[in-house]
């Protein structure tokens, strides 16, 4: 029996390896020409937005919130149906998280819930393009009318997707990407912030680089000497090395192929599972062209845990994405309560991600489909006995 079929995995070719080796042999291991080149290539995928690469997707969120000026006393609105970093990276800056529920079908941030949660202290509203399906950005914008809040897109799942024909990267004031191995492209660890606002981009670049100001005309002590650099606001070292940017550039050349393959596998799942009793396939809006990162089904009749266990026992590495963020003990200890976001919580109780990645072969996908059908039959056979 082969190893567990994973729910996601990278696709690395000889070209990727060669790109990394070339960077290793160059004069630069970090902060060299590959960084600027990868940022330019990413900009091409992000509708021309300015891009700052960073060391991972969590760092991208931290940088984006810092660029937005998030600090103590500010509120940041986040959906619970996300990886906890969407929220915890704003907590790290002293913000208070306000969880707003998601919409049925897409399980992305609900504009009506945002309108109800917004206060004079709301600094950022962070939408998450869950599974690669863009949130409803025009409606979210409308919900923010009359406030100073910035809109952030956590696009860890959705690079290459579009909303009403507009590319992810241009839909919010700030957009963040992750290049973790399970995501739509990888640099091992890596991430990026995209924005069309030059001032936000400048602040993001500075926070990524310890807050150092190198531009002479902006320095307070500009006569200090040629070596001089100074810090005006504190930042961190979140730089993505040249070696990994070289991998990212090479991966990005295949992003179109990756997305096409993911879409093809999604269509195969949709067709095979449409009439399978006991599960629901993922919903979508006709205005979205998702960049499918996950294939999240809903398992009905309270059987998610049982089906998870049966699939795992059959060698299928299904996953659950995600436990509602406000259920994490760190939030529970701050007083966040279960029951506050019923759509997210009901979805979590049913959610199961099936394997989805470019290298998933049709034969393996068929094995997933058969295992799911068998698992679903398993219990009904047993209960009929
Ligand atoms: C993966 C992910 C992140 C964090 O990215 P890392 O690169 O793992 O730090 C943030 N938000 C979402 C929705 C993610 O899926």
Image (cartoon, grey):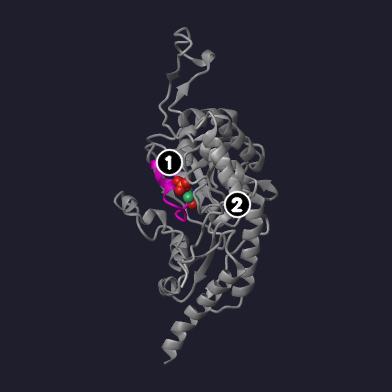
Residue 222 position (above or below residue 93): above
- The residue at 59%/36% (across/down) is 39
Residue 349 position (above or below residue 142): below
Q: Residue furthest right?
A: 165
Disc 2 to disc 1, C-alpha distance? 21 Å
Q: Residue furthest left?
A: 333
Residue 136 has which mark? 2
SS under mark 2: loop
Q: Is residue 89 magenta?
A: yes
Q: Position of residue 211 (x, y in %)?
A: 44, 26
Q: Position of residue 309 (x, y in %)?
A: 40, 72
SS under mark 1: strand
- Magenta-colored span: 75-91
Residue 143 appears in the rendering:
no
Q: Which residue is mark 1?
A: 75
- Binning the other alpha carbons within 10 Å of mark 2 as few (below 14), some (14 to 19) or many (20 upward) gives many
Q: Residue furthest top?
A: 223
Q: Nearer the viewer, residue 190 or 207?
A: 190
Residue 198 position (above or below residue 384): above
- The residue at 42%/32% (across/down) is 237
- Binning the other alpha carbons within 10 Å of mark 1 as few (below 14), some (14 to 19) or many (20 upward) gives many
Q: Earlier in the sequence, mark 2 or mark 1?
A: 1
Residue 63 appears in the rendering:
yes
Q: Nearer the viewer, residue 327 or 214?
A: 214
């Amino acid at each position: 029996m082969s190893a567990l079929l994973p729910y996601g995995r990278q696709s690395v070719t000889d070209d990727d390896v060669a790109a990394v080796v070339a960077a290793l042999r160059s004069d630069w291991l970090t902060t060299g020409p590959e960084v600027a080149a990868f940022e330019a290539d990413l900009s091409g995928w992000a509708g021309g937005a300015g891009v700052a690469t960073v060391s991972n997707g969590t760092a991208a969120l931290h940088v984006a919130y810092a660029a937005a000026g998030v600090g103590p006393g500010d509120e940041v609105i986040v959906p619970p149906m996300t990886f906890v970093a969407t929220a915890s990276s704003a907590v790290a800056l002293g913000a208070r998280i306000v969880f707003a529920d998601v919409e049925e079908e897409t399980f992305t941030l609900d504009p009506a819930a945002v309108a109800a949660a917004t206060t004079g202290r709301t600094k950022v509203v962070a939408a998450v393009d869950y599974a690669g399906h863009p949130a409803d950005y025009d409606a979210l914008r409308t919900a923010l009318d009359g406030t100073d809040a910035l809109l952030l897109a956590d696009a860890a799942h959705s690079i290459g997707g579009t909303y009403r024909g507009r590319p992810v990267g241009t839909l919010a004031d700030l957009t963040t990407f992750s290049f973790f191995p399970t995501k739509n492209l990888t640099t091992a660890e890596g991430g990026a912030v995209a924005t069309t606002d030059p001032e936000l981009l400048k602040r993001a670049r500075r926070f990524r680089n310890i807050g150092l100001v190198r531009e002479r005309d902006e320095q307070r002590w500009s006569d200090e000497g040629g070596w001089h650099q100074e810090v005006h606001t504190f930042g961190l070292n979140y730089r993505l090395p040249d070696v990994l940017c070289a991998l990212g550039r090479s991966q990005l050349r295949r992003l179109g192929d990756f997305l096409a393959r993911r879409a093809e596998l999604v269509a195969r799942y949709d067709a095979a599972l449409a009439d399978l009793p006991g599960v629901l396939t993922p919903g979508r809006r006709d205005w979205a062209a998702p960049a499918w990162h996950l294939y999240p089904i809903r398992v009905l009749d309270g059987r998610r845990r049982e089906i998870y266990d049966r699939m795992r026992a059959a060698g299928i590495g299904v996953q659950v994405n995600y436990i509602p963020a406000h259920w994490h003990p760190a939030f529970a200890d701050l007083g966040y309560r279960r029951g506050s976001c019923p759509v997210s919580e009901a979805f979590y109780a049913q959610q199961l991600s099936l394997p989805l990645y470019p290298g998933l072969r049709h034969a393996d996908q068929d094995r997933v489909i058969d295992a799911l059908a068998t698992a679903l039959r398993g219990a009904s056979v047993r209960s009929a006995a």
